[in-house]
Image (spheres, grey):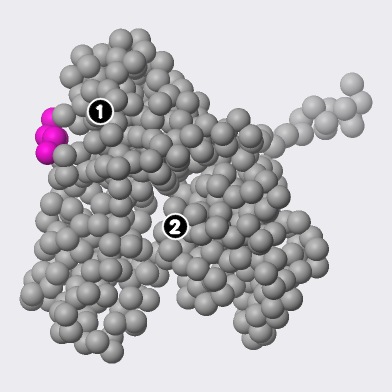
Amino acid sequence: MTTAQARQDLAVQPTPLALLLLGREADTRSERGVECPGDLPSPSDPDLVERARAAKEKLGEKVFILGHHYQRDEVIQFADVTGDSFKLAKDAAARPEAEYIVFCGVHFMAESADILTADDQKVVLPDLAAGCSMADMATAEQVAECWDVLTEAGIAERVVPVSYMNSSADIKAFTGKHGGTICTSSNAERALDWAFEQGDKVLFLPDQHLGRNTAVRDLGLSLEDCVLYNPHKPNGGLTAEELRNAKMILWRGHCSVHGRFSLDSVNEVRERIPGVNVLVHPECKHEVVSAADYVGSTEYIIKMLQEAPAGSKWAIGTELNLVQRLANRFAADDKEIVFLDRTVCFCSTMNRIDLPHLVWTLESLAEGKDINRIQVEKETADFAQLALERMLALP
């Protein structure tokens, strides 16, 4: 063997996972993205705002920019519409004249927009690495294995999957294929009511907290009616008997932002601000939701604060960008709005969409370059759309 051959044999070849983590490879079936091709503008460039404005003006009606509520203000200022993930996907579908849909959100949101928009429209995500840790907690392979476990337990035909909007296109497609529906945090109760009319058990994906809170708070089920399926344990860490006795089979997933709020956070803010109203998102833990005064979706939180009387005090348990924006918006109305937890809690993946990425995206599109397009494979899109259509048909 020559020296060169020996060196070649000893050379370490990067694994696909290593390449992915290094930003040099893509995993199309994962929420984790890849590096952004091309050179990003410097974040210290004082002309970024003007560059974004000029590129958007050049594109005109060819571009439609969606801004999720959790986005930075520097990005939100360029959004044509703002909202939660499903509202934005529907807004995109209502703009067939737009050639480019720039989704300032995360990967699963852009997938939903691609599913709902026309084939000739191009959905673009400014940073492909803007994913969702919750959506990542349920892969297609894991959910297929779970269904095998339910089949072996003899209950699969009685289980209706209900998947939260915050899930990948693959999970939405699984849901559609197995007779289930999608839900948002606004209509989760209606979705579960519908599901229990179709069967006597629900597999709720991927957020355990929204599933548990809706089942117990809204439907009147008990905590004992719920079991937690852990995809990292054999048979989900559950016995066949536990699965047969359960009404809600909750996937072991959670939001990294809302999951950090604790009962101590609630108690501390009540002691610190007498008379404060605690308003939290249903992705929070059950003990936090139980201790709160009000619980609801992002749109519900905004509406509550809009209608709140002057002089009222609020501690909000949701993403910090939104809380800060609402605090500034209603400060003139003498509404005191604080973050429920005293430590910083941004959605780190949502915050990957920043002004440099937006400028790079708009300027690239203005130059006729197709970049960072999100495309869902047709069969996956068809089954996912079936699940979404069942949600839209809910009473």
Q: Is residue 387 above or below residue 47?
A: above
**Could you say where residue 208 lies in the image, as x and y percent from the top left?**
29, 40
Q: Which mark is residue 197?
A: 1
Choose between 45 and 203: the one closer to the eye. Answer: 203
From the image, which quarter does the N terminus lie in? top right
Q: Which mark is residue 87?
A: 2
Extent of the magenta region: 220-224
Q: Is residue 175 above or below residue 153?
A: below
Classify residue 380 as left or right of residue 88: right
Res 311 visible: yes
Q: Secondary structure at mark 1?
A: helix
Q: Residue at x 23, y 60 (%)?
A: 280
Classify residue 250 as left or right of residue 266: right
Q: Is residue 82 above or below residue 51?
A: above
**Could you say where residue 391 lies in the image, as x and y percent from the top left?**
39, 41
Task: Determine the CA span between mark 1 and mark 2.
Answer: 26 Å
Other residues around mark 1 within 10 Å, as few (<14) / some (14–19) / many (≥20): few
Q: Please identify the quarter of the rendering in which residue 279 is found.
A: bottom left
**Could you say where residue 136 lies in the image, as x and y percent from the top left?**
47, 41
Q: Amino acid at mark 2?
A: Lys
Q: Amino acid at mark 1?
A: Glu
Choose between 3 and 232: the one closer to the eye. Answer: 232
Q: Please identify the quarter of the rendering in which residue 182 is found.
A: top left
Q: Earlier in the sequence, mark 1 or mark 2?
A: 2
Question: Quick check: is 289 in the magenta stretch?
Answer: no
Choose between 33 and 179: the one closer to the eye. Answer: 179
Q: Residue at x 40, y 20 (%)?
A: 147
Q: Please identify the quarter of the rendering in which residue 124 is found.
A: bottom right
Q: Residue at x 12, y 76 (%)?
A: 273
